[in-house]
Each structure stands twice: as structure tokens, then as C-alpha cells.
């Protein structure tokens, strides 16, 4: 039985770790011995009920979990310390359990893996999850001419040159990597696996009734152009005066209310709710359509928004923007949404008219579900990961 080590710098106790790591590994463990090395935050460890539930779920799947503590401050030194602990732990696990493949999720985990590959010769899967160094710059965390950015790009080059297989979230990112000068003539094997959704949970129910509801799900800050979404709803009310905006957001309610007021939208036309991840499908079932806009910066060419697959899986057409991964191509080619190229009033009005036509189109909900299964099925994502492992002897 092949032994595989999966390294995630994201904690498995977090919702992201459970939906985007554990959900895959539970399906990949059949016929393999999987070891999971993760870094857990102190506040998650303090939740004993969650720890026990997740640990029991991992044991039931037959996965061997090796959690370590995540350190945050001071930022660079804390990350360097975690990398050292992770590399030593990974090396011990590889030697102790004769691990054949080390699967690194994103850049920090890949740094840990490089030591293992150099020392023990295990196969290296670089699951890049996006252009992480460029995200730090585009997000305003690092200057483009700063030392940290250049160090991270140096490591990115090493990862791509030394990986036995690369996993990308988008075809758009692959096209960008094909332009990298150092990869000319030596592109590694690459498999595209977008951020998948559990489409057994995110599935359509009865069509929503009553007045038109435009949905907004998830974060309103950082990469999201929430002001543009508010402006879009304001213009929708000129077309559909009865329209309401349903916002599902966990931790930014004060900011959301502030931006709604700044956009001139009355709060009585808005319903702002907090929902756990398990409750989100029921809230999506109330939406006729959804809107979200993401900053179309370079790093977002490698991004695959989780919400897109979840919304389409629930049969909901979307209004979004171009310049973000494969999103515009999927919406346009599958005719399940609208992708605008700019955010001025004319573009918003045209996008809204096209969205209203889609909402009223026969069979639109079924078409959205079909698109979700074509691009974002968790089962298909697992099958592609399985093929990657098998290509490396696992």
C-alpha cells in the first residue's frame, strides 16, 4: 500500500481545511496510507468539541493525523519556525513510514517538502493554489520590489522546476506559467483541479418564491469589490423596485452596513445574515440570482472562487467580472451567468439586463447545475488527484 504525506499549512480544524483538504483525503485514502501534517491555530485547539469531532472524523476515514501548532507573530520568524518544525516532522514521517509521495498544499508547505525531496527523494506534488507571492503584493501586504517578494518568487521557481507534478486551480494560470522564461522547454506535468464543491449538499431545491432576491455570499473585503456589488443592487432596484438583497456574511457586518449606507441603498431593502457553512445551501435556495466582483489583478488569474461552484450547484445564475481565473469563460460559454469587463453604470446596467434574461430563461437552473457538475464536482476533483498519484506510482 503506497504511503502519501499531505502537508497543509491551513488548519484542518478550520472550515476551509475540512471542505478543501479533508473532504478530498477521505475519498483518496482507499488503497493508500495517507498521513496528514497540518498546522492548527490556538483558538481552534481551544474548541474541544470541534477538536474531538474532527479527530474522530479523521480516524474513521483511516487517515493518520499529525497536527502541529501554527505560530503567527512575529510573522516572518513565526513562519520560519513553523517551516523548520514542518520539514523535520515531514522528514521523520517519510523515513519512518516509507512515504513515496509528498503532496504540498501551497507555498509554505512546499518549502517544507523541498528538504524532504532533497534528502529522501520522495515524489513532490506542488498543489500551488494560486500565485501566492503575487497575491501578497496585489493585496498590499508586500512591496513588489521588496526582499520577501523576491525570496518567495525564487522559491516559486524552484518548486515549479523540481516538482514531479503541479496542480493548478485554473487553466488561466497554466497559460501564464507557459510564458515564464525559465519554464520554456521544461514545463512540469500540470493538472488543473479547480476549487470543488460538495454538490450533494449544494444542490437545487424548489424555485424561490415571492419578490426577486439577489444574493451575495461570503467576504466583502480584501479581494472583493463590495461597493460595486452595492451599486449593482442599487441599479437593479430601478429595474425591479421590489428586489431585495440577501447577504450571507459571517464577520463583517459593521463594514457591510457602512458600505450599503455609502452606496445609498436603504437597509430595509437588505437582509444581512450570518450563517455557518452547513446552513449556506438553505440560504442560497432563497436567491434568484447572485452577484460578486473580485479585483481583476494578476494573481487572481490563478484563483477559483469556491462560491461559484456552490451557487451554480444550487441552480443560481451569477453576475461577476472578467479577469479572475476561468470564471468568465465558464459563465459565458455555459450561459449560466454574466461576466462584465468594467464597473461603470453602463456595464452594470447591461450586465443586469442580461442576468434578468437568464433568470427567466427556460431550463436555466438545470443548466447551472450541469455546469457545476462539469467544472466543480468534488468527485471529479478526487478522480483527478487520484490520477496524479497513480502517475507517480501511488
Image (tube, grey):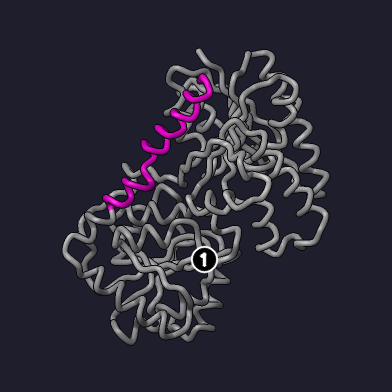
Question: What residue do we see at 79% from left, 48% from top?
Answer: 151
Q: Quadrant of residue 49?
A: top right
Question: Where residue 91 sits in the image (x, y, percent)?
Answer: 72, 22
In the displayed structure image, the side of residue 245 where residue 173 appears, left or right: right
The answer to whether residue 278 of the structure is visible from this angle is yes
Quick one: 142 or 202, which is closer to the camera?
142
Question: Where residue 104 sits in the image (x, y, percent)?
Answer: 62, 34
Residue extending furthest left? 362
Question: What residue do we see at 75% from left, 62% from top?
Answer: 144
Q: Which residue is mark 1?
A: 294
Q: Please, is residue 344 above or below residue 106 in the view?
A: below
Q: Please, is residue 164 above or below residue 194 in the view?
A: above
Report the predominant secondary structure element of the magenta stretch.
helix
Q: Is residue 73 magenta?
A: no
In the displayed structure image, the side of residue 257 where residue 117 appears, left or right: right
Tell me the crowding category of disc 1: few under 14, some 14 to 19, or many 20 or more residues within 10 angstroms, Cα based. Answer: many
Question: Where residue 212 sits in the image (x, y, percent)?
Answer: 27, 73
Residue extending furthest front? 185
In the displayed structure image, the side of residue 321 where residue 199 appears, left or right: left
Question: Where residue 194 sits in the image (x, y, percent)?
Answer: 46, 46
Which region is colored magenta?
369-394
Question: What residue do we see at 38% from left, 43% from top?
Answer: 198
Amino acid at each position: 500500500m503506497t504511503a502519501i504525506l499531505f502537508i497543509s499549512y491551513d488548519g484542518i480544524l478550520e472550515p476551509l481545511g475540512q471542505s478543501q483538504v479533508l473532504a478530498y483525503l477521505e475519498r483518496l485514502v482507499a488503497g493508500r496510507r495517507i498521513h496528514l501534517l497540518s498546522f492548527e491555530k490556538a483558538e481552534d485547539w481551544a474548541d474541544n468539541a470541534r477538536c474531538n469531532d474532527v479527530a474522530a472524523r479523521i480516524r474513521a476515514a483511516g487517515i493518520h493525523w499529525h497536527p502541529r501548532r501554527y505560530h503567527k507573530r512575529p510573522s516572518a520568524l513565526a513562519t520560519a519556525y513553523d517551516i523548520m518544525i514542518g520539514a523535520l516532522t515531514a522528514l521523520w514521517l517519510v523515513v519512518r513510514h516509507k512515504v513515496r509521495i509528498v503532496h504540498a498544499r501551497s507555498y509554505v508547505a512546499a518549502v517544507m517538502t523541498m528538504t524532504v525531496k532533497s534528502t529522501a527523494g520522495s515524489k513532490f506534488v506542488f498543489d500551488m493554489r494560486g500565485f501566492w507571492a503575487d497575491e501578497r503584493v496585489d493585496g498590499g501586504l508586500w512591496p513588489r520590489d521588496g526582499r520577501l517578494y523576491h525570496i518567495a518568487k525564487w522559491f516559486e521557481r524552484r518548486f515549479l522546476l523540481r516538482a514531479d507534478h503541479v496542480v493548478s486551480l485554473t487553466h488561466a494560470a497554466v497559460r501564464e506559467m507557459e510564458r515564464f522564461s525559465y519554464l520554456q522547454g521544461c514545463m512540469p506535468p500540470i493538472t488543473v483541479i479547480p476549487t470543488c464543491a460538495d454538490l450533494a449538499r449544494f444542490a437545487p431545491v424548489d424555485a424561490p418564491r415571492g419578490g426577486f432576491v439577489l444574493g451575495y455570499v461570503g467576504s466583502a473585503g480584501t479581494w472583493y469589490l463590495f461597493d460595486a456589488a452595492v451599486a449593482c443592487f442599487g441599479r437593479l432596484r430601478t429595474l425591479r423596485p421590489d428586489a431585495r438583497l440577501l447577504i450571507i456574511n459571517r464577520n463583517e457586518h459593521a463594514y457591510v452596513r457602512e458600505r450599503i449606507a455609502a452606496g445609498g441603498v436603504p437597509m430595509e431593502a437588505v437582509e444581512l445574515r450570518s450563517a455557518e457553512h452547513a446552513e449556506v445551501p438553505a440560504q442560497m435556495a432563497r436567491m434568484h440570482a447572485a452577484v460578486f466582483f473580485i479585483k481583476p489583478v494578476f494573481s487572481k488569474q490563478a484563483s477559483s472562487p469556491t462560491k461559484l461552484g456552490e451557487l451554480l450547484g444550487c441552480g443560481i445564475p451569477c453576475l461577476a467580472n472578467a479577469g479572475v481565473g476561468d470564471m468568465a469563460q465558464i459563465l459565458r460559454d455555459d450561459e449560466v451567468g454574466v461576466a462584465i469587463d468594467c464597473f461603470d453604470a453602463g456595464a452594470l446596467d447591461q450586465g443586469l439586463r442580461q442576468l434578468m434574461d437568464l433568470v427567466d430563461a427556460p431550463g436555466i437552473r438545470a443548466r447551472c447545475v450541469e455546469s457545476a457538475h462539469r467544472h466543480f464536482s468534488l468527485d471529479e476533483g478526487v478522480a483527478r488527484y487520484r490520477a496524479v498519484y497513480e502517475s507517480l506510482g501511488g
